[in-house]
Image (cartoon, rainbow, N blue to C red):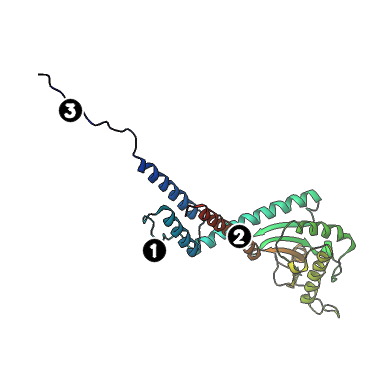
């Protein structure tokens, strides 16, 4: 008698149907958390709402609302990042200003530096702008200041105009001391920029007399360097603008998250 082997049940090849659904769910969760981590700092209430919605959509308890990952970045690291971004922005401003100065052929009259403490500083020697002991802008400097006003229009930062003198004393009815002279010079430049369309609310003027010299006042050359007007984009203003831009971008990402939540099945 012939022996017959038992017929084995046919084995279905491939993954079972539930694995496909599970894979789709895991892919959706992966995309969701990648989006969350890309935001650096999140609104916890929005995170809770999004997780709750996702749980309802997937009908799964695999994501627990009460176990929120600690994804908020450290405040000190975030502040450090803001300072780094601000420094990069200051470098960009200096590069753009130097290109403008080169194009306008005013390099011999104006110098731009990046000061890590103060911000971006445009330095103008006062002999270009004023006669000795005076605060009225010379006719010959109008073209120069007009060019600088055009440059300031290229940026949205606040502008601080500082007047500086050497340590030579002055005493007149109009200017009893270098405080009054330096303040008047800074104010005259500010008023000129306002006439060229720079918004007054962006502007501030300050006279610092002889108390922030660039170099020693013991030589003629040193005193000439110390007599100057400086136009400053302050670092704190740049950081504020960078932070504002960052917050706006974060809000846009949160809005995108909200839109994704709306698209999830309910």
Mark 2 or 3 closer to N-term? 3
| Badge 2 vs badge 3, beta-carbon distance below 8 Å | no
Query: What is the spatial separation of the Cα atoms under label 1 and label 2, in whole angstroms?
Result: 28 Å
Q: Quadrant of residue 234?
A: bottom right
Residue in the image at 62% along x and 62% along y: 244
Residue at the far left: name it: 1
Q: Residues within 10 Å of mark 1 (few under 14, many from 20)?
A: few
Q: Nearer the viewer, residue 110 or 264?
A: 264
**Numbered mark located on residue 209 in the image:** none
Q: Quadrant of residue 198?
A: bottom right
Tell which tag, 2 or 3, sits nearer the viewer. Answer: 3
Can I make out residue 111 in this image?
Answer: yes
| Badge 1 vs badge 3, beta-carbon distance below 8 Å | no
| Badge 1 vs badge 2, beta-carbon distance below 8 Å | no
**Numbered mark located on residue 6 in the image:** 3
Residue in the image at 78% along x and 69% along y: 186
**Numbered mark located on residue 248 in the image:** 2
Residue at the far right: name it: 139
Can I make out residue 72 in this image?
Answer: no
- Disc 1 target residue: 66
Q: Residues within 10 Å of mark 2 (few under 14, many from 20)?
A: few
Query: What is the spatial separation of the Cα atoms under label 2 and label 3, in whole angstroms?
Result: 71 Å
Image coordinates of residue 229 in percent, x first then y, are 77, 65
Image coordinates of residue 178 in percent, x first then y, are 78, 75
């Amino acid at each position: 008698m012939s022996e017959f082997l038992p017929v084995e049940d046919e084995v279905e090849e491939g993954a079972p149907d539930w694995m496909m659904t599970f894979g789709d769910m895991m892919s959706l969760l992966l995309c969701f958390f990648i989006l969350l981590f890309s935001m650096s700092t999140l609104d916890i209430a929005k995170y809770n709402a999004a997780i709750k919605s996702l749980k309802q959509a997937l009908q799964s308890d695999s994501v627990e609302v009460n176990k929120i990952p600690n994804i908020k970045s450290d405040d000190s690291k975030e502040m450090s990042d803001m300072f780094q971004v601000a420094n990069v922005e200051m470098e960009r401003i200096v590069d753009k200003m130097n290109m403008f100065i080169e194009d306008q052929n005013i390099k011999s009259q104006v110098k731009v530096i990046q000061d890590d403490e103060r911000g971006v500083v445009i330095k103008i020697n006062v002999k270009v702008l004023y006669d000795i002991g005076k605060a009225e802008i010379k006719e010959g400097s109008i073209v120069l200041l007009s060019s600088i006003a055009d440059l300031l229009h290229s940026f949205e930062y606040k502008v601080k105009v500082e007047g500086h003198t050497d340590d030579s004393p002055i005493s007149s009815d109009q200017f009893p001391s270098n405080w009054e002279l330096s303040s008047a010079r800074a104010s005259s430049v500010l008023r000129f920029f306002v006439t060229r369309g720079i918004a007054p609310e962006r502007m501030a003027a300050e006279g610092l007399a002889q108390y922030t010299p660039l170099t020693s006042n013991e030589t003629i050359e040193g005193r000439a360097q110390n007599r100057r007007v400086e136009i400053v984009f302050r670092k704190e203003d740049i950081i504020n603008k960078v932070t504002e831009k960052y917050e706006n971008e974060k809000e846009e990402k949160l809005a995108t998250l909200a839109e994704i939540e709306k698209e999830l099945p309910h």
